């Protein structure tokens, strides 16, 4: 099983967004995991192409060692999801209002790895696959 320290450093990200209700999208950029005293801080930055738009984009999370795995939190400390960092691992679901976010990690080709999100709700229906490789 992997540990928080295994994610430390910089990763290249290639993300495909398959939106069944709108235009497809793509994000290309980098993610950096840095120590923050309690675990790791995750920061990604890059370029999002969605329909005809090209935008600078970023996102932040906190990663913490948890019983049997890793807890991913929003920057303000609210829980987002948990997963066991080995093989193919389904994370815990994250309900957000009437939307449901489901994640599955694929760590079978470590240090290349992926996270696949399926998001459904009254106005959402997309799959987002993020592929990471060491930078």
Image (cartoon, rainbow, N blue to C red):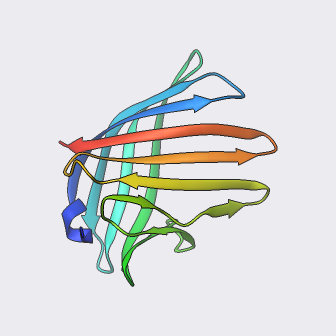
**Residue 131 at x, y percent in the picture:** 34, 40
Asked if residue 72 lies left or right of residue 35, the reply is: right
Q: Is residue 8 left or right of residue 47?
A: left
Of residue 135 and residue 106, the one placed in the foreground of this image is 106
Q: Quadrant of residue 84?
A: bottom left
Question: Where in the figure is residue 121, as x and y percent of width and height?
Answer: 76, 47
Q: Relative to residue 110, is residue 52 depicted above or below?
A: above
- Above or below, 44 against 42 in this view is above
- Image label count: 0
- Which residue is at a point 33% across and 66% down the rendered structure image? 85
In this rendering, does residue 32 appear at all? Answer: yes
Residue at 19% x, 50% y is 111
Task: Residue 70 in the image: state x and y as whole percent.
Answer: 38, 72
Decide which of 18, 72 is in the foreground and name it.
18
Task: Please determine whether, in this image, residue 44 is positioned above or below residue 5.
Answer: above
Q: Residue at x 69, y 38 (%)?
A: 125
Q: Is residue 5 depicted above or below 44 in this figure?
A: below
Horizontal arrangement in the rendering, residue 42 relative to residue 121 (left or right): left
In the picture, the quarter occupied by the C terminus is top left
Q: Residue at x 63, y 21 (%)?
A: 23
Name the image quarter holding residue 52: top right
Judged from this view, the residue extending furthest toward the bottom is 67
Which quadrant would residue 61 be assigned to in this image? bottom left
Image quadrant containing the N terminus = bottom left
């Amino acid at each position: 099983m992997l540990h928080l320290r295994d994610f430390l450093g910089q990763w290249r990200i290639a993300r495909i967004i398959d939106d069944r209700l709108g235009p497809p999208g793509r994000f290309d950029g980098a993610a950096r995991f840095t120590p923050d005293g309690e675990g790791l801080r995750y920061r990604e930055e890059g370029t999002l192409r969605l329909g005809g738009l090209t935008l600078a984009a970023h996102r932040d999370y906190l990663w913490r060692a948890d019983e049997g795995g890793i807890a991913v939190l929003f920057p303000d400390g609210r829980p987002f999801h948990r997963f066991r960092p080995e093989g193919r691992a389904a994370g815990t679901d994250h309900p957000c209002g009437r939307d449901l976010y489901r994640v599955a990690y694929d760590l079978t080709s470590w240090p290349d790895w992926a996270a696949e999100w399926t998001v459904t709700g009254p106005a959402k229906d997309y799959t987002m696959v993020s592929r990471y490789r060491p930078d």
